[in-house]
Image (cartoon, rainbow, N blue to C red):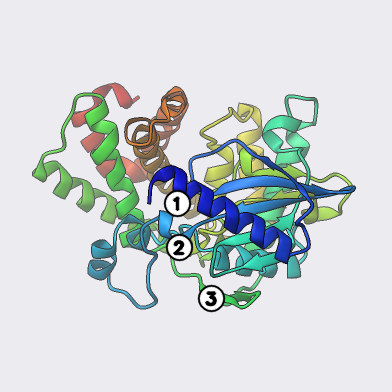
Amino acid sequence: MSASQSDSAREAERRAFLAASGWGDASVTPFPGDASTRRYFGVTRGGETAILMDAPAASEAPVCPPGATPEERAKLGYNALARLAGNNVAAFAGIGDALHARGFSAPRILAADMARGFLIIEHLGDDLYARAIPKGAHEGRLYAGAVDTLAAIYRSSFTPDFTAHGGSWRVEAYDTPALLAETGLFLDWYMPHFGKEASPQLRADWQGAWETVLALLGAHTPGLALRDYHAENLIWLPTREAEAQTGLLDFQDALFAHPAYDLVSLLEDARRDVSPDLIAPLKDRFFKHAKLSDRAGFDAAYAVLGAQRNAKILGIFVRLAKRDGKPRYLDLIPRVRAHFAGDIAHPALAPVARLVRAALPEMTP
């Protein structure tokens, strides 16, 4: 089947799903694409607006089966190794329903076809943090709300098994193989983009250095990490109360992880600069509201996860540009590189910093 035929067939499936869900007469407007293979559409009927999620499962590599070994995951591909949900709408629906049931503002699921990869979800509005702040919303207030929501999610209890609308999904641990697979993107994509190739020895040393620093993540009890918690994925909902004022848009890849992970995602944003004078108070606020202890251990874990996440993002952004034809992501690299350099300056990252200094000396402070 040609690409145009495939697109036409998928459009027919979308229209059939809308009709079966009572939205057959709705106007449909596509949203701009992002870094994923999912597509989103605004659907409007009368005065009611919702979002159509179109996530064909066959468009991505297989996900991680329950109980799979790291070797089995590696054979299945990157999604399984890094424990990504891919286009499994059961993950979005199940985790979203669980968050909503606990008072958080995840979109309600209005209709679902799990087998074909379609959801109609609540439209939370257009006030993304990334848009609301430039328009005059108070940055400190919004980020304080986002931190309070994160702390409340961490304090909440979640079982690993999530079900909704006939679908089921199991949330696993953000384990060392997943974290290591992501740091490997730095060697696979970022370094070659700047004319450097990773030798077998460097790859072995890289893995060993990361295994050493990732061991520092055991000082705190894991919690549910949404894994892509930043200003482009958060909606400001000022008419709601407390933690529900922060709308949540992207959580299908959630795993159980160290509590610093989503805080790093929020404060070391790849797409916007958080005001520097907010960073320390927001870290303090999260530490207090999440009811954590061992501040030195938390700060070390924050630096480790910041370095891990930013190493991954540097690789992903080059991959998006080179492999997927999305060169705009290269414009974001200087900010992410600065985050990464700051993270590896922490003493806990000394084993990684030594390797980066030798391979790419311009990246180290």
Residue 160 numbered tag: 3
Three-letter amino acid code of the residue under disc 2: Ala
Residue 118: give x, y in percent of width and height. 60, 60
Answer yes or no: is residue 294 visible: yes
Residue placed under numbered mark 1 in the picture: 301
Number of other residues with Cα within 10 Å of mark 1, as a class: few under 14, some 14 to 19, many 20 or more: many
Three-letter amino acid code of the residue under disc 3: Pro
Residue 60 versus residue 143 in the image, above or below:
below
Residue 265 versus residue 20 in the image, above or below:
above
| N-term mark: 1 or 2 | 2
Q: Quadrant of residue 212?
A: bottom left
Residue 101: give x, y in percent of width and height. 75, 70
Q: Is residue 250 left or right of residue 197?
A: right
Residue placed under numbered mark 2 in the picture: 219
- Tell me what residue is drawn at x 48 percent, y 50 percent: 296
Q: Quadrant of residue 21?
A: bottom right
Three-letter amino acid code of the residue under disc 1: Ala
Looking at the rendered image, the quarter that the C terminus falls into is: top left
